[in-house]
Image (cartoon, rainbow, N blue to C red):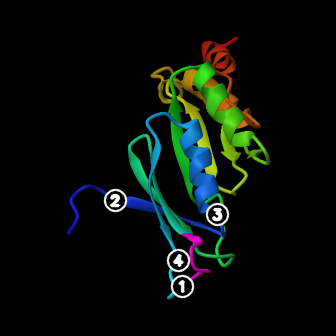
Amino acid sequence: MATDGFTTCLWYDGQAEEAAEFYVSIFKDSRITRITHSTESGPGPVGSVLTVEFTLFGQRFVGLNGGPQFTFDEAISFQVPCADQAEIDHHWDRLMADGGRPLACGWVKDRYGLCWQIVPEMLVGLLTDPDPKKAARAMEAMLATAGKFDIATLERAHAGG
């Protein structure tokens, strides 16, 4: 039995290599580690990309070119904690590129249909403030966010301004 953690498998309809290249270009400490190809026994045409193994932030993934049977939806998303607004802007803008679309509360669906939560690290502290009025204002500001988080807006709401 393997003892080095688990691997998240992401099902694509022929775009696994393209998606992996896209993701490793966005996130630091990320790389493609292996690409496998279909053989004479299938399942795709001989030589076509079957799987792409990659890591993002040290987390292992495998992109599987499984076909059109399954697609991503909002039931699964990946949270990306961001230290500051520049990091939020970087991740958000890159994931929105070439067909991504914004969702509520800091979520973005990338061009492959995968959902990401681009979240400021300080948000949990605002939402769990011991002062219930401050926490409530921060929660209201978070829920009112129609797309990308703006740290200054969240902090102003928390402070009562």
Q: Are marks 3 and 4 in contact (CB under 8 Å)?
A: no
Question: Dividing the picture into quarters, in which one does residue 5 lie?
Answer: bottom left
Magenta segment: 43-49
Give me the disc on residue 42.
1
Which of labels 3 and 4 is toward the front? 4
In the rendering, at what x and y percent does residue 123 appear? Answer: 54, 27
User: Mark 3 or mark 2: which comes first in sequence?
Assistant: 2
State the residue at coordinates (68%, 41%): 95
Q: Give yes or no for residue 68 being in the magenta stretch.
A: no
Which of labels 1 and 3 is toward the front? 1
Label 1 element class: loop
> For the residues marked 1 and 3, what is the alpha-carbon distance in whole angstroms?
24 Å
Q: Are marks 4 and 1 in contact (CB under 8 Å)?
A: yes
Give the residue pinned by disc 2: 6
Give the residue pinned by disc 3: 72
Q: Give yes or no for residue 46 being in the magenta stretch.
A: yes
In the rendering, at what x and y percent does residue 81 appear? Answer: 50, 33
Give the residue pinned by disc 4: 38
Question: Dividing the picture into quarters, in which one does residue 19 lie?
Answer: bottom right
